[in-house]
Amino acid sequence: MIRLLLAEDHHLVRGAFVALLGAEPGIEVVGEAGRGDEAVRLAAELRPDVALLDIDMPVMDGLEAAERLAAVAPGCQVVIVTGHGRPGYLRRAMEAGVRGFVGKDHPAAALAKIIRQVHEGRRYIDPELAADALALRECPLTPRELDTLRAAAGGVPVSRIARVLGLSEGTVRNYLSAAVTKLAADNRHAAVRHAKEMGWL
């Protein structure tokens, strides 16, 4: 029996996943969460075999949750489900050790098959997303520029970004300016938006 943890922030969608996947032979839904941080907490407590994580969740998204799961529940394999075809997400998912990456439009039977495949130690990547990822240009930003842009999301002031990242305000401004220039954005808010659309943040 595969012990499955489900994390999806939309209650109706999560309920449908629980009902459909819970009815599949050999799969038992042992926990459900509406946020990424809840999924991490439940995984540490329940030790599921597979975690099915929505990529867009409040507080902590599915990719960050996947990274945390590797530490708190190392035996748990992760399948990311997304409603967005942002190829940059695929690259980040692979770096986080995710074993499955699928669209939400997969029928329950196909999703159950992917969960079984991942549980057996194999990998499943949506072919269309994989093709898109191969065509996607590499992220031009350095890891530090990405960290600074990520911290700047939501209009956070430079002084606070500097405190959070342990940098001087001048260094933060330099990183933000470099990111804006490389992305040919009008300002840092546009740079953050563009980087998110590309799946780099």
Image: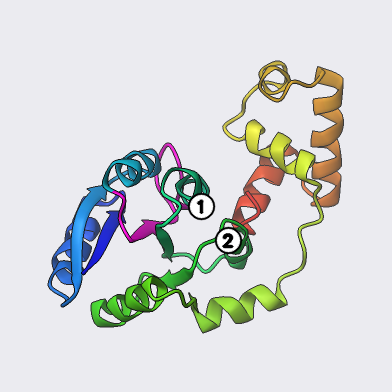
Secondary structure under the numbered disc 2 in the rendered image: helix
Circle 2: is it few (<14), some (14-19), or many (20+) Cα within 10 Å? Answer: many
Compared to 15, does 61 lie above or below? above
Find residue 132 and report its horizontal and vertical position in percent.
Answer: 62, 77
Circle 1: is it few (<14), some (14-19), or many (20+) Cα within 10 Å? Answer: many
Query: Residue placed at 42% from the left, 36% from the top?
Result: 59
Query: Residue placed at 27% from the left, 61% from the top?
Result: 4
Q: Specify the quadrant that holds the N terminus.
A: bottom left
Secondary structure under the numbered disc 1 in the rendered image: helix
Q: Main secondary structure of the magenta part?
A: loop
The range drawn in magenta is 47-62
Compared to 29, does 154 lie above or below? above
Q: Are marks 1 and 2 in contact (CB under 8 Å)?
A: yes
- Which residue is label 1 attached to? 63
- Which residue is label 2 attached to? 89
User: Given the image, on which type of amino acid does mark 1 rest?
Assistant: Leu
Question: Is 127 on the left or on the right of 14, as rendered?
Answer: right
Front residue (pair 137, 95): 95
Asked where in the image residue 165 lies, by quadrant, the reply is top right
Query: Residue placed at 54% from the left, 82% from the top?
Result: 128
Compared to 130, does 14 lie above or below? above
Question: Is 47 on the left or on the right of 191, as rendered?
Answer: left
Query: Residue placed at 19% from the left, 74% from the top?
Result: 26
Compared to 152, does 40 lie above or below? below
Find residue 134 and report its horizontal and vertical position in percent.
Answer: 69, 77
User: Given the image, on which type of amino acid does mark 2 rest?
Assistant: Tyr
One can see residue 175 in this view: yes
Mark 1 or mark 2: which comes first in sequence? 1
Reply yes or no: does residue 87 show up in magenta: no
Question: Is 20 on the left or on the right of 166, as rendered?
Answer: left
* Colour convention: rainbow
